[in-house]
Amino acid sequence: MNMDYPDCAFCRIATCRVPAEIVYEDSESIAFLDIHPLFPGHVLLCPREHYETLSDLPLGLTGPLMAITQLLARAVEAALDAEGTFIAINNRVSQTVPHLHIHVVPRRRRDGLKGFFWPRTPYRDESAREAVRDAIEREIQKLLV
Ligand code: 5GP
Ligand code: ZN
């Protein structure tokens, strides 16, 4: 069992010390409405236990959490009559609550969501692209050993 972090906003919600508009919960996870939604229906899904980033999440919890993400995406689309969803995780950078959470945001075409406009950075040339590909593949091989 992981430690509960008393100063963590989402540990407080997960342990019912602070109220939230809960839409789903089970023994390992909890999902609730974001207090400052990008759009109505913006949901946050957290593991109950305090893991800071996706990299910290035990492998055994990744599958169940993704299954609940799928469930929430379907439910949010249906409930808000949305055309799709945006699913996102901020890992450290831009992460304001250091307790892993998956954003499930209802989307419509031309809904004005511009905050997720990412300027693209092309590779210098083909060899730079290949070097990055090689480096990532090497790290994957190391992690799979
Ligand atoms: P992040 O920026 O870390 O990816 O997202 C954190 C999200 O948590 C923000 O969208 C913010 O509105 C939401 N949030 C922060 N504190 C609370 C809270 O106490 N209750 C709820 N329901 N949402 C919160
Ligand atoms: Zn926490």
Image (cartoon, rainbow, N blue to C red):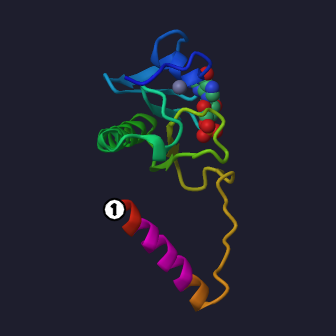
Q: Nearer the viewer, residue 53 or 77?
A: 53
Residue lying at 50% horizontally and 33% vertically, measured from the top left:
44
Whether 24 is drawn above or below 80: the answer is above
Classify 10 Å Cα crowding around label 1: few (below 14), some (14-19), many (20 and above): few
Residue 110 falls in which quadrant of the image? bottom right
Question: Magenta includes 87?
Answer: no
Q: Position of residue 87 (x, y in %)?
A: 48, 48
The answer to whether residue 85 is visible is yes
Question: Magenta includes 133?
Answer: yes
Q: Position of residue 85 (x, y in %)?
A: 47, 48
Residue 74 falls in which quadrant of the image? top left
Q: Which quadrant would the N terminus be assigned to in this image?
A: top left
Whether 114 is drawn above or below 103: the answer is below
Q: Nearer the viewer, residue 74 or 123?
A: 123
Regarding mark 1 in the picture, which secondary structure is present there? helix
The answer to whether residue 35 is visible is no
Q: Position of residue 72 (x, y in %)?
A: 38, 37
Q: Which residues are magenta?
A: 130-140
Residue lying at 63% horizontally and 89% vertically, measured from the top left:
125
Q: Is mark 1 within 8 Å of ligand 1?
A: no
Q: Pointer 1: what residue?
A: 144
